[in-house]
Structures are given as C-alpha cells and as structure tokens.
C-alpha cells in the first residue's frame, strides 16, 4: 500500500530585524560644506555615529563609514552600501538615498 504525503507550503521566513549596529552606510561630504557651512554639516551628521573617516584629496571630500537609522540593515558579511545625502535648506533637514 502506497502512502500519500500531503504537500505543504512553508511560509516565507520573516525578514530579519536589524540592530542599530547593522545599519551601516558609506557617504561623502565635500570639504567646503564642513568649512563654509559647519552648521549645515552638523545637522547633516545628526543621528550618524561615524566609525571611520578619511580625507579624499582627489575629490576634496571626507569619506565616512557610519551607523544610523537612516541606513538599511546589512546582513553579516554583506556589502556596506553607499548613500547620497542632500540638504533641504527650506525644510532644514537632510535626506538620505541609497546610491545605485
């Protein structure tokens, strides 16, 4: 006698919830922003914990690696994405978009 097994479909595993330490991103700020408009630079950096900063002499900018709620989570061993940051003078706030 043959046994018939009921086929079941498993639900998709839940998406991982990321801790703050996993919300990493790379971004650059022009040197002129920090020297000519330090108050804007301070507001842009609000909510970002910088873990590495290097000065790029070719582009005259600072390249940052940081942790922030503005960034998407990165799975362990995954590539850390880059972000573009833009400043809205009228609203007085920065917006972050993942670079393509």
Image: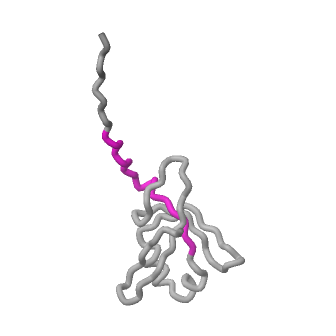
Task: Please give the name of the residue rendered at 47% of the width and 80% of the height, measured from the top-left corner.
Answer: 86
Verify whether residue 96 appears in magenta.
no
Q: Nearer the viewer, residue 22 or 98?
A: 98
Q: Nearer the viewer, residue 97 or 92?
A: 97
Residue 81 lies, in percent from the top left, at 53, 62
Residue 61 occupies which quadrant of the picture? Answer: bottom right
- 98 relative position to 7: left or right: right
Task: Please give the name of the residue rendered at 51% of the width and 63% of the height, measured from the top-left corner.
Answer: 25
Instruction: Establish if 44 lies above or below 64.
Output: below
Residue 67 lies, in percent from the top left, at 47, 61
| Segment tinted magenta in the rendering | 11-28
Point out the residue furthest to the top here: 1
Residue 84 lies, in percent from the top left, at 51, 73
Indicate the colouring scheme.
Answer: one colour
Task: Please give the name of the residue rendered at 46% of the width and 84% of the height, measured from the top-left corner.
Answer: 39
Question: Looking at the image, how many numbered discs can be counted on the residues?
Answer: 0
């Amino acid at each position: 006698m043959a046994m018939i097994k009921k086929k079941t479909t498993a639900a998709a595993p839940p998406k991982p919830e990321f801790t703050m330490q996993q919300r990493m991103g790379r971004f650059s700020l022009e040197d002129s922003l920090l020297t000519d408009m330090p108050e804007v630079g301070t507001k842009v950096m609000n909510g970002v914990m910088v873990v590495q900063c290097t000065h790029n002499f070719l582009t005259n900018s600072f390249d940052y690696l940081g942790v922030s709620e503005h960034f998407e989570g990165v799975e362990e061993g995954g590539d850390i994405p880059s972000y573009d940051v833009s400043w809205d003078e009228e609203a007085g706030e920065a917006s972050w978009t993942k670079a393509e």
